[in-house]
Image (cartoon, rainbow, N blue to C red):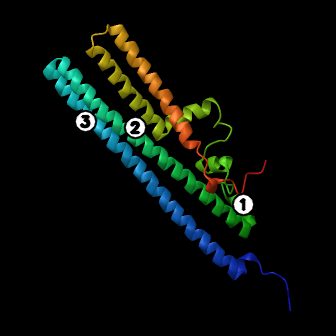
């Protein structure tokens, strides 16, 4: 009786494993697509609320000539916009964490493909490794460019980073309007608005960093990238 193992392509067990891996891969891909859809939907809702608030304030300003009534209505309206923006950013960061999870899962499945058919390695441009460099490769982000200044610039190119700047501007406008309402000089109003903007941007950055700094045992690297 021959004890020679059949090639992977003719091994029924390998074919069954490949079918299971491919099914799970398509499931994660569909889930990732839903994640992107919800992210864009949340951003559209926030921008619609922001646009409506600006139009409403423009009408109030024409009627009140930027008087005390306008300042009060503007602060209350922008507080609603600020709350909506913070809730949107919070959800987007959660969706980004979910997207990172799906990418890690697909990288692990890709590692399973290569265990069955190692000769297919040169055909993949995405990574079969489930650590940070492997995830960045699958995202299409250069690992060396994701450090230092490149990383800081990339943060503001993401949906949460872009909305953080907009929400910070709304917070700065609220601070300036409050200063204007109590009768502070124009220079102080401008400086206070700018200070609130900068402080909010920094707080958003700390919030984002802590959000992605949470450790999840299920995402611990099982197939790390080679050194």
The residue that mark 2 highlights is: 86
Q: Nearer the viewer, residue 19 or 165?
A: 165
Looking at the figure, which quarter contains the N terminus?
Answer: bottom right
Left or right of residue 72, residue 144 in this image: right
Q: Are marks 1 and 3 in contact (CB under 8 Å)?
A: no
Q: State the image coordinates of residue 104 (x, y, percent, origin top left).
A: 61, 55
For label 2, count other residues whose C-alpha is less than 10 Å away and answer few (under 14), some (14-19) or many (20+): some
| Marks 2, 3: nearer the viewer | 2
Q: Residue at x 68, y 66 (%)?
A: 112
Q: Residue at x 40, y 37 (%)?
A: 86
Q: Could one spot residue 218 in this view of the protein? A: yes
**Residue 143 versus residue 117 in the image, above or below:** above
Q: Earlier in the sequence, mark 1 or mark 2?
A: 2
The residue that mark 1 highlights is: 121
Residue 52's disc is 3
Residue extending farthest to the bottom is 1
Q: Secondary structure at mark 3?
A: helix
Residue 43, quarter of the rendered image: top left
Q: Earlier in the sequence, mark 1 or mark 3?
A: 3
For label 3, count other residues whose C-alpha is less than 10 Å away and answer few (under 14), some (14-19) or many (20+): few
Q: Nearer the viewer, residue 117 or 226?
A: 226
Q: Are marks 1 and 2 in contact (CB under 8 Å)?
A: no
Q: Earlier in the sequence, mark 2 or mark 3?
A: 3
Residue 53's disc is none
Q: State the image coordinates of residue 24 (x, y, percent, origin top left).
A: 56, 67
Q: State the image coordinates of residue 181 (x, y, percent, origin top left).
A: 26, 16
Q: Nearer the viewer, residue 75 or 150?
A: 75
Q: Residue at x 31, y 34 (%)?
A: 81
Left or right of residue 8, residue 60 in this image: left
For label 1, count other residues whose C-alpha is less than 10 Å away and answer few (under 14), some (14-19) or many (20+): some
């Amino acid at each position: 009786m021959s004890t020679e193992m059949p090639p992977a392509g003719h091994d029924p067990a390998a074919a069954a494993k490949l079918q299971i891996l491919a099914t799970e891969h398509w499931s994660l891909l569909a889930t990732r697509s839903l994640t992107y859809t919800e992210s864009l939907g949340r951003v559209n809702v926030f921008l619609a609320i922001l646009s409506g608030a600006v139009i409403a304030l423009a009408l109030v300003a024409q009627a009140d000539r930027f008087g005390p009534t306008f300042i009060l209505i503007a602060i209350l309206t922008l507080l609603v916009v600020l709350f909506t923006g913070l809730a949107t950013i919070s959800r987007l960061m959660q969706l980004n964490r979910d997207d990172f999870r799906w990418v890690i899962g697909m990288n692990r499945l890709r590692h399973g493909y290569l265990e069955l058919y190692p000769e297919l390695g040169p055909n993949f441009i995405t990574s079969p490794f489930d650590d940070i460099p492997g995830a960045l490769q699958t995202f299409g982000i250069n690992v060396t460019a994701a450090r230092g200044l490149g990383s800081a610039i990339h943060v503001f190119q993401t949906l949460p980073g872009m909305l953080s700047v907009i929400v910070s501007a709304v917070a700065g406008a609220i601070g300036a309007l409050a200063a204007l309402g109590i009768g502070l000089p124009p220079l102080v109003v401008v400086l206070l608005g700018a200070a609130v903007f900068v402080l909010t941007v920094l707080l958003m950055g700390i919030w984002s960093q802590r959000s992605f700094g949470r450790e999840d045992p299920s995402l611990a690297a099982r197939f790390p990238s080679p050194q």
